Amino acid sequence: MTNKSIILTILDVKCGTGISTHVGTTLFEYLKRLGRDVVTRLINVVSDNGSDVTAAIARLFQLVNTFIGYGQMRKVNHVWCADHSVQLIVLKYRVEAATAGLASKEPTHQDSPMRWNSIHEMCADASGKRVVLDNIMDQYAADIGHGAFPDLEWHAIDGVSTFLRAPRQVMESLATDHKLTLDLVPMSVSLLLKHCDDNELKLQEIDDKLTTVGMKAKLEKYKSKLV
C-alpha cells in the first residue's frame, strides 16, 4: 500500500473582523469537517508572510494540537511564500542602504558558479555594502542561523575578491581585444596558472577552506585543448 498526498487549497475564508483568530479557527473547523484523518495528516501549511496570517496559522496549529491530543504542532511545517520573502528582504535592504547612505540601493550581486567574474563582482559588491548586510543579518539571525559576519569572514571575502581581480582583468582584456591572436590565449592561461600557484598559500593563510585547486583544474583542462 503506497502513501498518498493531497494538496488542499483554500481560496476563501469567511472570517469577518479579528483576522488572525477567526482565520485560524475557521481553517480548523473546515479541516475538521473533512474528517479526523485529514486533521491528523496535516503536513504543510503555505501562506504569505503577513503578521496576521502568521498568527492565524499559529492559532490553527494550536487548535489541531488540542484536537488530536499530542504534539502534532512539531510535525506541521508553516511554509512561507519564497517570493514574498525575497520581496521583503529586498525592500528591507533598500531601507537599510538608504539609512547607511549608500549611493546604490540595488541588492548585492548573486554568485554564478560557472563564472569567476561573477564571484569577484559578488565579493567586491558585498564588501562595499558590509554595514547594510551586517545589519540585516543581525535582524534576521533567528531565521538564517547566524548574525553579522565576524571580521575573519569579511577578511576571507576580501581575500577571494583580491585573488579574482587578476583573472577578471585578463578575461576582460581578452574579450575586448579586437586584435586577439591564438598565441595570446595560451599565454593568458599560463599566466592564470602561475597566479594560482603564487596565491595558494596566501589564500590558505586567510582560511584553510580557500584553495585554487578547482580553478587550476579547469585552467589545465583549457590548456590541454589548446594544443
Image (cartoon, rainbow, N blue to C red):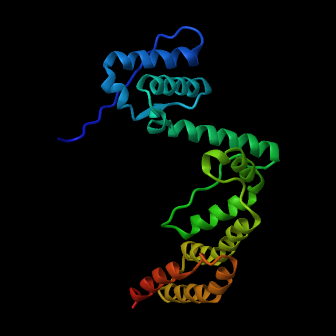
Q: Residue at x 70, y 53 (%)?
A: 147
- Residue 196 place in picture, x, y as percent: 59, 85
- 92 above or below 24? below
- Residue 100 place in picture, x, y as percent: 81, 47
- 45 above or below 125? above
Q: Quadrant of the C terminus?
A: bottom left
Which image quadrant for residue 28? top left
Q: Please name whichever residue, 145 or 170, is drawn nearer the observer in this view of the structure.
A: 145
- Residue 87 place in picture, x, y as percent: 59, 38
Q: Please name whichever residue, 222 or 31, is drawn nearer the observer in this view of the structure.
A: 31
- Residue 85 place in picture, x, y as percent: 57, 39
- 61 above or below 18? below
In the figure, is residue 165 to the left or right of 225?
right
Q: Please name whichever residue, 117 or 62, is drawn nearer the observer in this view of the structure.
A: 62
In the figure, is residue 148 to the left or right of 114?
right
- 225 above or below 44? below
Q: Residue at x 44, y 38 (%)?
A: 75
In the figure, is residue 174 to the left or right of 92?
left
Q: Residue at x 78, y 53 (%)?
A: 131
